[in-house]
Amino acid sequence: AARLPGAPPCQPRACDQSEERTCQQAPFNWPRALSTATGAMGYKVAILGAAGGIGQPLSLLMTTNPLVSELAIYDIANTPGVAADLGHINVAPSIKGYAGAEQLGECLKGAKLVIIPAGVPRKP
């Protein structure tokens, strides 16, 4: 039986005798793709703290996810530069950088997933 790209392999399961469907015939509950402002199918993901040491590689990693169609990155400073760097890579999602408290609402608008790697570095 054909599977959707990225779908987990079918696992054997105990079935009730009255159940006629097999695992291959059962519908797969894949997250429903959502249309975004870009017209592409997928999710808008917001990363708050994207200019930091964890946020930058996390942002890069999220650009490789086929379910992400729009990546909104936010930090208190330097985010437009990170967005420009990510924009030079041949990736599918649209990338937009937001900086400062006044742009936080716009960054979060329509986001289906918010990731917050921001924080204060630990002192030795």
Image (tube, grey):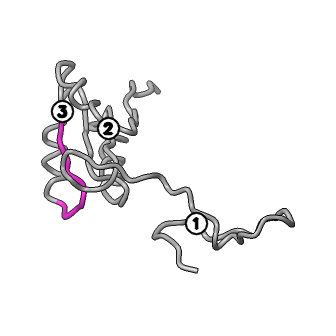
Q: Earlier in the sequence, mark 1 or mark 2?
A: 1
| Residue 72 in which image quadrant | top left
Mark in the foreground, 1 or 2: 1
- Does residue 109 appear left or right of residue 30 in this picture? left
Q: Which residue is mark 1?
A: 8
Q: Earlier in the sequence, mark 3 or mark 2?
A: 2
Mark 1, secondary structure of its residue: loop
Residue at coordinates 58% horizontally, 80% vertically from top-left?
1
The stretch of residues the image draws in magenta is 89-98
Q: Which residue is mark 2?
A: 46
Q: Which residue is mark 3?
A: 98
Is 21 drawn above or below residue 105 in the view shown? below
Q: Which one is nearer the viewer's eye here, 31 or 95?
A: 31
- Tag 3 near tag 1, CB within 8 Å: no
Give the amino acid at mark 1: Pro
- Tag 1 near tag 2, CB within 8 Å: no
